[in-house]
Image (cartoon, grey):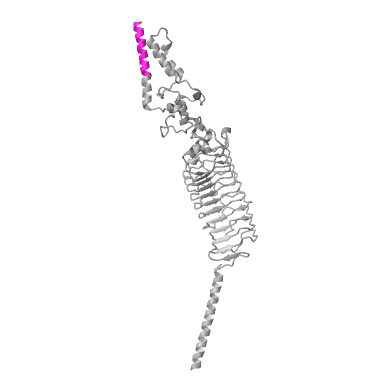
Amino acid sequence: MESRAALRRSRASSALSFKSGLTLWLVVWLLACRVAPGRACPKLCVCYDTPMTVSCQSQNFTSVPVGVPYDSQRVFLQNNRIIELRADSFGFETQVLWLYSNNISWIEAGAFSNLRVLEELDLGDNPSLRRLDGGAFRGLERLQSLHMHRCGLTELPADLFHKLYSLQFLYLQENQLSHLPDGLFSDLVNLTHLFLHGNRIRTLSENAFRGLVNLDRLLLHDNRIRQVHRRAFRDLGRLTILYLFDNQLRELPGQTLRDTANVQFLRLNGNPWGCGCEARTLWEFFRGARVSSSEVTCTSPAPRKDQDLRFLREMDFALCPLPDPGSLAGTTTTTFSTKTRWWFSKGKPAVSSKGAFHKSGEAVKAFPFASVKNVHPVAAAAAAAASNLASKYEPMAEEAALPKLEPEEYWANYGNEDSALVRCFELECPPADESPVLPSSSSSSTSFFSFFSLLSLSMLALSLHLLFG
């Protein structure tokens, strides 16, 4: 009996050992097969799990290899010799696709349309990729990051980024772009970072950045930008970093930067800034802005060469007209600044007003009796007083040096300041006894009253002279 029991125990122990070994072998086999369920890893590639990754980098592939598992989350194809991407190149579904440092020269429209869940696409360092078809990125509505730096791109189709609503990072630096089509980025409502530095861009049009309402960083340095439309940044209200250094900017409308109300870091150095009247609005922007800025070094006019525009004084722009709000890049119109108005007020009576402002010739014509012989002494005195009043409006030396302006144009824009006080620096303030006087309703009334009182007195004296000889 004991021998039979021992035999049974021996058989049970052998069965248990066999089951344990079989189980262990099955676990190992399943782990080995889990890397590429249903498919083998492509030849010359390495596949591994968590996350499911296929790495085929640096294998001299001239086309996308076949046999990439459909459920691969990441596919690395960088540092190969891939020449073109066709619509049937990708038969798998992935989230990250790296194709940088290849020889790609052509991407067929719809080449990525099967990659519906793709979030990151890196096509950088493909110097032969000089142009793209409009539908190259069709179907990538979940794409968040797109790299196309150092690709030799010379132009971009206006519909290239159509429906890429999820895109947040766009790298276009170090290409050969000379122009940004209007509305190019209009669908990129969630874009936060746009890198365009190191290109050949010359102008920024009104609609160059239309739609970028969430953009946080815009890098435009190291281009050839000469002109920026005053409304080029009108949708960039959330921008915090703006780099425009190392371009060819001589002027920049102040309105352009006022549209970027939240900008914190501004770099404008390395431009040939003109610091004449064309720089007034940019100077005014710096006076009111709280922004970390680089230096803005003047190259002209000669007296201001090597000075920093930000630290010029108000008197430096005393004779400058204000910018025309309807111009493209801040050209001027005949509307005078507060400081220029103070120059106009110097030497005039304190009661100067719109109602009493006449050309001297017109004022003399208002008193025809001044040339009549045998005028009564009272009338003559009144006429002399009136003539003296008119003579006070003869232009002084400072006034004559200013651009010619009709009085209607001058007074139509007078008194529009937010404050009645004229701000000035110590060296440019008028003497204490020559404080600038701005017209008011009371001074206007006083001037009119004085004028008509003189006229009434003169007419009365003339009547008495005619009646009583």
Q: Residue at x 45, y 25 (%)?
A: 346
Residue 307 coordinates in the image, percent (x, y): 55, 37
Q: Nearer the viewer, residue 189 or 216?
A: 216
Q: Residue at x 52, y 83 (%)?
A: 15
Q: Nearer the viewer, residue 401 or 129?
A: 401
* Residue 73 seen from this side: yes
Q: Residue at x 49, y 93 (%)?
A: 2
* Residue 91 seen from this side: no
Q: Is residue 200 above or below residue 32?
A: above
Which residue, as the protein is rendered here, is positioned at the far top?
A: 469
Of the 4 image quadrants, the one containing the C terminus is top left
Q: Is residue 291 magenta?
A: no
Q: Nearer the viewer, residue 427 or 127?
A: 427
- Which segment is the magenta one? 451-469
Q: Nearer the viewer, residue 99 or 349?
A: 349
Q: Is residue 291 above or below residue 330?
A: below
Q: Is residue 467 magenta?
A: yes
Residue 100 coordinates in the image, percent (x, y): 60, 55
Residue 104 coordinates in the image, percent (x, y): 62, 54
Main SS class of the magenta portion in the image: helix
Quarter-of-image position of residue 49: bottom right
Residue 110 coordinates in the image, percent (x, y): 56, 54
Which residue, as the protein is rendered here, is positioned at the far bottom?
A: 1
Q: Is residue 304 above or below residue 94?
A: above
Q: Is residue 447 left or right of residue 40?
A: left
